[in-house]
Amino acid sequence: QVQLVQSGGGQVQDGGSLTLSCVASGSIHSIHAMYWYRQTPGNQRELVAGITFGGTRNYTDSAKGRFTISKDDAKRATYLRMNNLKPEDTAVYYCNAEGIVTMGGQLKEPWGQGTQVTVLS
Protein backbone atom coordinates (compact mmCIF):
# COMPACT_ATOMS: atom_id res chain seq x y z
CA GLN A 1 0.00 0.00 0.00
CA VAL A 2 1.40 3.37 -1.02
CA GLN A 3 0.77 6.24 1.31
CA LEU A 4 1.97 9.74 2.07
CA VAL A 5 2.57 10.74 5.67
CA GLN A 6 2.86 14.39 6.54
CA SER A 7 4.51 16.11 9.47
CA GLY A 8 5.21 19.65 10.51
CA GLY A 9 2.78 22.52 10.55
CA GLY A 10 1.41 24.24 13.59
CA GLN A 11 0.86 27.82 14.72
CA VAL A 12 3.18 30.76 14.16
CA GLN A 13 3.09 34.53 14.32
CA ASP A 14 2.80 36.74 11.26
CA GLY A 15 6.21 36.71 9.57
CA GLY A 16 7.22 33.37 11.04
CA SER A 17 8.42 30.23 9.31
CA LEU A 18 7.42 26.60 9.16
CA THR A 19 8.55 23.52 7.29
CA LEU A 20 6.20 20.77 6.17
CA SER A 21 7.40 17.27 5.36
CA CYS A 22 5.80 14.50 3.34
CA VAL A 23 7.21 11.00 3.07
CA ALA A 24 6.04 8.37 0.64
CA SER A 25 6.09 4.77 1.76
CA GLY A 26 5.21 1.43 0.25
CA SER A 27 6.32 -0.60 -2.71
CA ILE A 28 7.40 2.30 -4.92
CA HIS A 29 9.34 2.08 -8.14
CA SER A 30 9.23 5.73 -9.16
CA ILE A 31 7.49 9.04 -8.53
CA HIS A 32 6.87 11.56 -11.31
CA ALA A 33 6.16 14.64 -9.22
CA MET A 34 5.02 15.80 -5.81
CA TYR A 35 2.88 18.76 -4.94
CA TRP A 36 1.71 20.80 -1.99
CA TYR A 37 -1.88 22.07 -1.91
CA ARG A 38 -3.81 23.98 0.69
CA GLN A 39 -7.45 24.31 1.55
CA THR A 40 -9.51 26.69 3.65
CA PRO A 41 -13.07 25.99 4.82
CA GLY A 42 -15.60 26.26 2.04
CA ASN A 43 -12.98 26.48 -0.69
CA GLN A 44 -11.37 24.07 -3.11
CA ARG A 45 -7.83 22.88 -2.66
CA GLU A 46 -5.40 25.16 -4.40
CA LEU A 47 -1.97 24.27 -5.66
CA VAL A 48 0.86 25.91 -3.77
CA ALA A 49 4.01 24.34 -5.20
CA GLY A 50 5.24 21.33 -7.12
CA ILE A 51 8.48 19.58 -7.92
CA THR A 52 9.14 16.98 -10.59
CA PHE A 53 11.45 13.98 -10.42
CA GLY A 54 13.94 15.99 -12.45
CA GLY A 55 13.83 18.84 -9.95
CA THR A 56 11.74 21.36 -11.87
CA ARG A 57 9.88 23.55 -9.40
CA ASN A 58 6.76 25.63 -9.81
CA TYR A 59 4.94 27.91 -7.41
CA THR A 60 1.68 29.75 -7.22
CA ASP A 61 2.09 33.52 -7.29
CA SER A 62 1.36 33.87 -3.58
CA ALA A 63 4.13 31.40 -2.73
CA LYS A 64 6.86 32.76 -4.98
CA GLY A 65 9.71 34.29 -3.05
CA ARG A 66 8.45 33.01 0.30
CA PHE A 67 8.04 29.24 -0.05
CA THR A 68 10.59 26.70 -1.21
CA ILE A 69 9.79 23.17 -2.25
CA SER A 70 12.50 20.54 -2.15
CA LYS A 71 12.88 16.79 -2.17
CA ASP A 72 15.08 14.00 -0.95
CA ASP A 73 14.84 11.12 -3.38
CA ALA A 74 16.59 8.69 -1.07
CA LYS A 75 13.99 9.30 1.61
CA ARG A 76 11.14 9.65 -0.92
CA ALA A 77 10.35 12.90 0.84
CA THR A 78 9.29 16.34 -0.18
CA TYR A 79 9.45 19.46 1.94
CA LEU A 80 7.81 22.86 1.89
CA ARG A 81 9.75 25.57 3.65
CA MET A 82 7.48 28.53 4.27
CA ASN A 83 9.02 31.87 5.25
CA ASN A 84 7.41 35.22 5.98
CA LEU A 85 4.09 33.55 6.65
CA LYS A 86 0.97 35.70 6.57
CA PRO A 87 -2.46 35.17 8.14
CA GLU A 88 -3.87 34.46 4.68
CA ASP A 89 -1.58 31.42 4.48
CA THR A 90 -3.68 29.81 7.21
CA ALA A 91 -5.07 26.56 5.80
CA VAL A 92 -4.84 22.82 5.88
CA TYR A 93 -1.90 21.80 3.72
CA TYR A 94 -1.87 18.54 1.78
CA CYS A 95 0.86 16.80 -0.15
CA ASN A 96 0.04 14.85 -3.27
CA ALA A 97 2.10 12.52 -5.42
CA GLU A 98 1.59 12.32 -9.16
CA GLY A 99 2.51 9.24 -11.11
CA ILE A 100 3.74 6.85 -8.45
CA VAL A 101 4.51 3.59 -10.18
CA THR A 102 4.55 0.67 -7.78
CA MET A 103 6.82 -2.35 -8.00
CA GLY A 104 3.78 -4.21 -9.25
CA GLY A 105 3.30 -1.75 -12.09
CA GLN A 106 0.28 0.05 -10.67
CA LEU A 107 -0.19 3.80 -10.90
CA LYS A 108 -1.04 5.59 -7.68
CA GLU A 109 -1.64 9.25 -6.89
CA PRO A 110 -2.19 9.39 -3.14
CA TRP A 111 -2.78 12.33 -0.83
CA GLY A 112 -1.31 13.00 2.56
CA GLN A 113 -3.51 13.28 5.62
CA GLY A 114 -3.30 17.06 5.79
CA THR A 115 -1.74 19.30 8.38
CA GLN A 116 -3.01 22.56 9.83
CA VAL A 117 -0.98 25.73 9.43
CA THR A 118 -2.24 28.72 11.41
CA VAL A 119 -0.64 32.15 11.14
CA LEU A 120 -1.61 34.61 13.85
CA SER A 121 -1.79 38.31 13.12
Image (cartoon, rainbow, N blue to C red):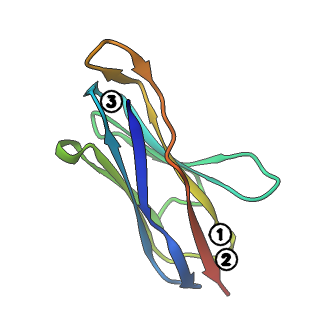
Give left or right: position of 42 versus 15.
Answer: right
The mark found on residue 90 in the picture is 1
Query: What kind of residue is marked 2?
Result: Pro
Query: What kind of residue is marked 3?
Result: Ile
The percent coordinates of residue 101 (x first, y second) are 34, 20
Secondary structure category for the residue under label 3: loop
Give left or right: position of 7 versus 44.
Answer: left
User: What residue is at 27 percent from the left and 28 percent from the top?
Assistant: 27
Secondary structure category for the residue under label 2: helix
The mark found on residue 82 in the picture is none
Give left or right: position of 61 versus 3.
Answer: right
User: Do the numbered discs 1 and 2 sit on residues whose CB atoms are within 8 Å?
Assistant: yes
Marks 1 and 2, how far apart at CA? 6 Å
Residue tagged 2: 87
Identify the image quadrant of the C terminus.
bottom right
Secondary structure category for the residue under label 1: loop
The percent coordinates of residue 66 (x first, y second) are 48, 67
The percent coordinates of residue 102 (x first, y second) are 31, 21
Marks 2 and 3, how far apart at CA? 33 Å
